[in-house]
Image: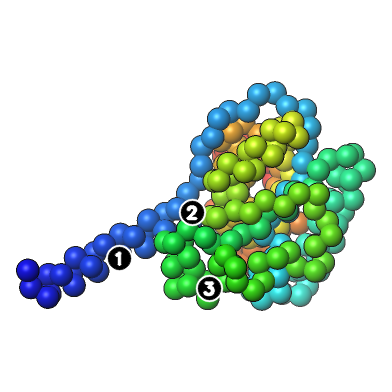
Amino acid sequence: MTLGIVLGIVALVLTLWLGNGVRRIGSVSVGETIRNRDASALLLIDLQSVFWERGPYSDAAKEGAAAVIYKEVEAARAQNHPVIAVRQEWSIPSTKAVARLTMKGQAIEGSDGTDLAEPFSSLPDQIVVKRVQDAFETGELDALLERLDVGKLRLVGLDFNYCVQKTALAARNRGYDVTVVRDGTLSAAPTEGAEKRMSSAGVAIR
């Protein structure tokens, strides 16, 4: 086998491996359909230092979203609804490689900035770590919501086009009643496509 063939095989394997990482990052999981549940919860998506402080969002956009997030937390507290923060940590080898190549290495497991940003650090009752855009992928969020008897979710955070969307769609796949609080989210790009996909899946956007 010539060196050229060996290098070609290595390049193909590496391309397939990275491609699998990209696929895993954007996939939406399908879990067991939930039974009837009465409780509600507020999910805070990816409100981490690395994204909030270093992301592509203007100060004005962050100020407006933060005000809405605080109101949502206050309303949840008043109704005894749990507030659950979801933090991104790329920990799968292929997704870590993709993050290094295309995301400036941000939010890789063990790296600086994966903790909640200071304005939100005291807000959650529970914190769940996710490995991809879909917060349900590991099963940890499924188990927590089952223990809390939660069947209704309100989502705020970032980014609307990615982790907010994928988490909302995964929740709908399981039968949750899902509302995305539009003014409590941030997005780095136009959101029309994400809005259509979520609306078609039964996600309320308000």
CA–CA distance between discs 2 and 1? 19 Å
Q: Residue at x 55, y 55 (%)?
A: 131
Q: Residue at x 75, y 67 (%)?
A: 117
Residue 5, how many percent across, how many down? 12, 70
Q: Residue at x 72, y 40 (%)?
A: 153
Observer able to see residue 139: yes
Mark in front: 2 vs 1: 1
How many residues crowd around disc 2 within 10 Å: few (fewer than 14), some, or many (20 or more)? some
Observer able to see residue 206: no
CA–CA distance between discs 1 and 3? 18 Å
Q: Which residue is denoted by mark 1 in the rendering?
A: 14
How many residues crowd around disc 3 within 10 Å: few (fewer than 14), some, or many (20 or more)? some
Marker count (numbered): 3
Q: Amino acid at mark 3?
A: Gly
Can you tell which mark lies on residue 26? 2
Q: Earlier in the sequence, mark 1 or mark 3?
A: 1
Please tell me whether residue 161 is drawn above or below residue 62 in the rendered image. above
Q: Quadrant of the N terminus?
A: bottom left
Q: Which residue is denoted by mark 3 in the rendering?
A: 105
Please tell me whether residue 169 is drawn above or below residue 157 in the rendered image. above
Residue closer to the observer: 135 or 199: 135
**In the picture, residue 3 is in which quadrant?**
bottom left
Q: Residue at x 71, y 74 (%)?
A: 53
Please tell me whether residue 201 is drawn above or below residue 123 in the rendered image. above
